[in-house]
Image: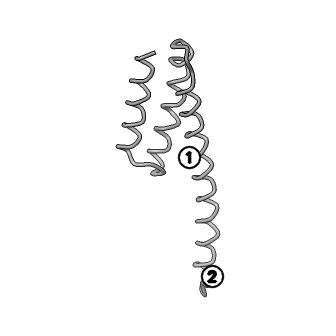
Amino acid sequence: MANHKSALKRIRSNNAKRLLNKYQHKTTRNAIRNLRAITSKTKAEKAFPEVASMIDKLAKRNIIHNNKASNLKSKLAQHIAKL
C-alpha cells in the first residue's frame, strides 16, 4: 500500500484514467464490430469516417499504438471496398 499522499492521489487518478480509457476502447471496438457487420456498401461508407475518427482519437491518446490504428483503418477500408 502507498504511504505518501501523492502516491495515494496517483492511484486514484490512474484508476479514473484507466476506466475512461477502457470505456473509450470498448466503445470503439463495438463500433468496429458493427461496421464489419454492415452489408450495405453505402451505409458502411457513411459509418467509416466516424469509426476512423474514433480510432484516431485512441491513437492520439496512446490508448492504442499508431500502427495498430493504421492497420485497423486499412482493414476496414479494404472490407468496405469488397462490399
Q: What residue type is labelled 2?
A: Lys
Can you tell which quarter of the image residue 26 is in?
top right
Q: Distance between the residues labelled 2 and 1?
A: 30 Å
Circle 2 SS class: helix
Can you tell which quarter of the image residue 67 is in? Answer: top left
Residue at numbered disc 2:
5
Q: Name the residue under label 1.
A: 25
Q: Earlier in the sequence, mark 2 or mark 1?
A: 2
Name the residue at 50% across, 17% down: 45
Q: Residue at x 45, y 20 (%)?
A: 80
Percent of width and height locating residue 83: 46, 15
Quarter of the figure with residue 74: top left
Residue for point 59% across, 59% down: 18
Q: Where is residue 2 in the image (x, y as percent from the top left)?
A: 60, 84
Instruction: Please state, as top left, top right, bottom left or bottom right, where the N terminus lies in the image.
Output: bottom right
Nearer to me, 72 or 3: 72
Camera-nearest label, 2 or 1: 1
Q: Where is residue 22 in the image (x, y as percent from the top left)?
A: 59, 52
Q: Residue furthest bottom?
A: 3
Amino acid at circle 1:
His
